[in-house]
Image (spheres, grey):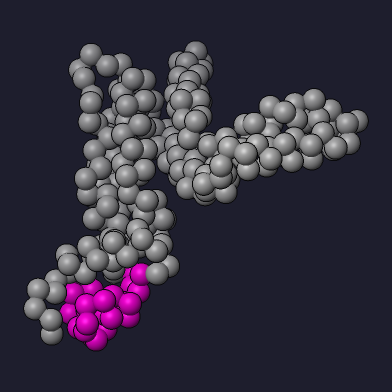
């Protein structure tokens, strides 16, 4: 057995490999080859691939603190905006965090529950009932996960890696394609072809502020509606 081989060392190497080559590249056989040991040696520290993925998830979520930058003078909407931005920055800095969270099969990494605790506190302070707040946390988590998955797709994020000329050619092709659609059936799309092409081929990360506005203003409207009943 290789000296110094521990669960922490194995998880750290798995994160390096996953970040460089994607989560699908991580396997116990591949890790064993990297360490120069047999897969059996790894089973002393991780039970199986599922256990490894769970440990990786717990590692990347461990440092998540969505309350960073909170001040006592902040109202609940300001705290929520700060919390969402902290979450995004944490995920941006750790490309594996989201796919690992999706693949996670444990009871929930502590970092995830810390985030949920903070969000629950914000929504309860705002005036939402407990059950309602929990449902909304789930909804917001789904929205953010979809957003972050989208910006992780280079081809869908405005042609990352393309030069200005290639990107303009792609934008123009999309615009012409939209203009050629049946105008009687899709009049608004045809009339908006230029703006649609520009927005669709822009990096979704450009619309982060609008994403947060949609969430926060939506929650404010829901709270106001509930109070007016």
Give the residues in magenta.
26-50
Answer with the quarter of the image where residue 99 lies: bottom left
Near-viewer residue (122 or 158): 158
In this view, 123 is above or below 40: above
Q: Can I make out residue 213 in this image? A: yes
**Quadrant in the picture for the N terminus:** bottom left
Answer with the quarter of the image where residue 64 lies: top left
Q: Can I make out residue 23 in this image? A: no
Instruction: Give the left or right position of residue 82, taking residue 69 as reference.
Output: right
Instruction: Give the left or right position of residue 7, taking residue 75 as reference.
Output: left
Near-viewer residue (216 or 228): 216
Residue at coordinates 26% horizontally, 76% vertically from top-left?
34
Near-viewer residue (172 or 129): 172
In this view, 213 is above or below 154: above
Residue at coordinates 56% horizontally, 42% vertically from top-left?
163
Rendered location of residue 109, percent (x, y): 27, 53
Residue at coordinates 46% horizontally, 25% vertically from top-left?
209
Residue at coordinates 64% horizontally, 31% vertically from top-left?
198
């Amino acid at each position: 057995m290789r000296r110094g081989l521990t669960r922490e060392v194995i998880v750290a190497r798995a994160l390096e490999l996953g970040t460089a080559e994607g989560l699908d590249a991580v396997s116990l056989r591949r890790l064993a080859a990297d360490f120069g040991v047999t897969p059996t040696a790894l089973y002393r520290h991780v039970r199986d691939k599922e256990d490894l993925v769970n440990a990786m998830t717990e590692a990347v979520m461990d440092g998540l603190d969505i309350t960073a930058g909170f001040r006592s003078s902040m109202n609940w909407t300001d705290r929520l905006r700060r919390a969402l931005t902290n979450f995004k920055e944490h995920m941006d800095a750790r490309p594996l965090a989201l796919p690992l969270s999706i693949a996670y099969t444990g009871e929930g990494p502590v970092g995830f529950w810390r985030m949920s605790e903070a969000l629950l506190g914000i929504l309860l302070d705002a005036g939402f009932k407990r059950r309602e707040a929990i449902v909304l946390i789930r909804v917001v988590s789904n929205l953010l996960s979809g957003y972050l998955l989208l910006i992780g797709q280079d081809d869908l994020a405005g042609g990352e890696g393309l030069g200005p000329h290639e990107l303009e050619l792609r934008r123009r092709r999309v615009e012409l394609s939209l203009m050629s659609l049946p105008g009687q059936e899709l009049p608004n799309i045809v009339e908006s072809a230029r703006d649609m092409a520009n927005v669709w081929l822009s990096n979704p990360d450009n619309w982060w502020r609008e994403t947060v506005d949609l969430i926060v203003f939506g929650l404010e409207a829901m709270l106001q509606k509930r109070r007016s009943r």
